[in-house]
Amino acid sequence: MKMNEKIIVGLMSGTSADGIDAALTRITGSGERTQIEILDFITFPYSSSLRKKVFLAMNPDRSHVQLICSLNFELGTAFADAVKAVCVHAGFDIERLNLIGSHGQTIYHMPRPEKGYDRSTLQIGEPAVIAFETRTPVVSNFRTMDMAAGGQGAPLIAYVDYLLFKQHFRTVALLNIGGIANLTVLPAGGSLADVTAFDTGPGNMVVDALVQKFYGKPYDRDGVYAASGTVNPALLREMMNDPYLTEKPPKSTGRERYGLQYAERITTAWSRLKPDDLIATATCFTAKAILKNYQKLILPRHRIEEMRVSGGGRHNPVMMKWLKEMLPDVSIQVFDQGRLNADAREAAAFAVLANETVHGQPANVPGATGAKEPLILGNYTPFIKNDGSGGICH
């Protein structure tokens, strides 16, 4: 292994809480000299009982401190199991692993004060459990330092997008449609200070909640329910009046705004609509929200030439069809950068962020998050390996 080379597993579980994405990576260098190779990638699914606990913990009306305390350790074990699983899948000896970068599972994200509560964010999945179970040091809790400095703690992936995907002669947008949709715009030949990134609004979250309510399935596979329904113009107008869509960056959002309560509000107020019509309208809302953010917040400064789409939403042909129709002048394609493909992108990003932490490199983008300054992100949990490595952050 080269002197500046590290084998790092990046771990990510998003707002849809389907499971844990684990990317086994080889990273050399740091900062603008970063180079990454994806050695393997898997998605380690949550058990149905664990997923239910995660959603219960996310629900402010039903969650409780004993659940969160216990779930923090239970998720730590699940994240450790994901590390072991990707190493086994790759035929890689876990003893050779240098570092783990774990995003954890967000259970609440409050980028602004609300009703007497301080702005804050909470990702759980105890890093000490991950470190002990894998015998490997862990970097975790990436969002909190940015928030301590006045930022929103999101989006963090914008820094990695800049390092790996900037182009000299072409303005590129990287769109991730997970539970929440987020957009990174990399202006042609721009610097890190020129990067624009923010959450555009809901991704699959509202659609998933409706499909679960009406059909008991986790998501709209292949967009079959949306394809069977008809978009209701009145409901769509109401949804598009959401002030978040035209709010200027920095901005981030989550399940607190577009989760189960949002879906319940729609189904109650529009109970006369057929389930498939509600699902079709919610699917269209995601695409229209992305369009509105682009028109109001990006287009006045940058014309996007190419948009690469990652996240579960790229598998929904109805959503992708509407997005392409709404943005006819933009080349929209599924994100595919060799082995750093649409599935592996976010997990690999947290491997890169962990690498930046141990190299003492600031890794937030203040222009995107709103933080007062560039900062080193993450908390380091050491574990001394048999060869004496892993004990100090360097």
Image: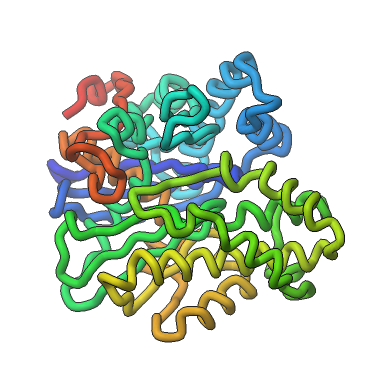
In the image: residue 369, left or right of residue 86: left
- The structure residue drawn at horizontal position 71% and vertical position 62%, both measured from the top left corner, is 220
- The structure residue drawn at horizontal position 23% and vertical position 68%, both measured from the top left corner, is 187
Above or below residue 183? Residue 10 is above
Q: Please state which of residues 90 and 298 is positioned toward the viewer in this rendering.
A: 298
Its colouring scheme is: rainbow
In the image: residue 189, left or right of residue 176: left
The percent coordinates of residue 115 (x first, y second) are 52, 27
Above or below residue 44? Residue 233 is below
Snapshot quadrant of residue 147: top left
The percent coordinates of residue 369 (x first, y second) are 31, 45
Snapshot quadrant of residue 273: bottom right
- Residue 20 seen in the current view: yes
Q: Please state which of residues 211 and 387 is positioned toward the viewer in this rendering.
A: 211
Q: Quadrant of the N terminus?
A: top left
- Residue 96 seen in the current view: no
The percent coordinates of residue 256 (x first, y second) are 57, 39
Image mark count: 0
Q: Please state which of residues 287 and 270 is positioned toward the viewer in this rendering.
A: 270
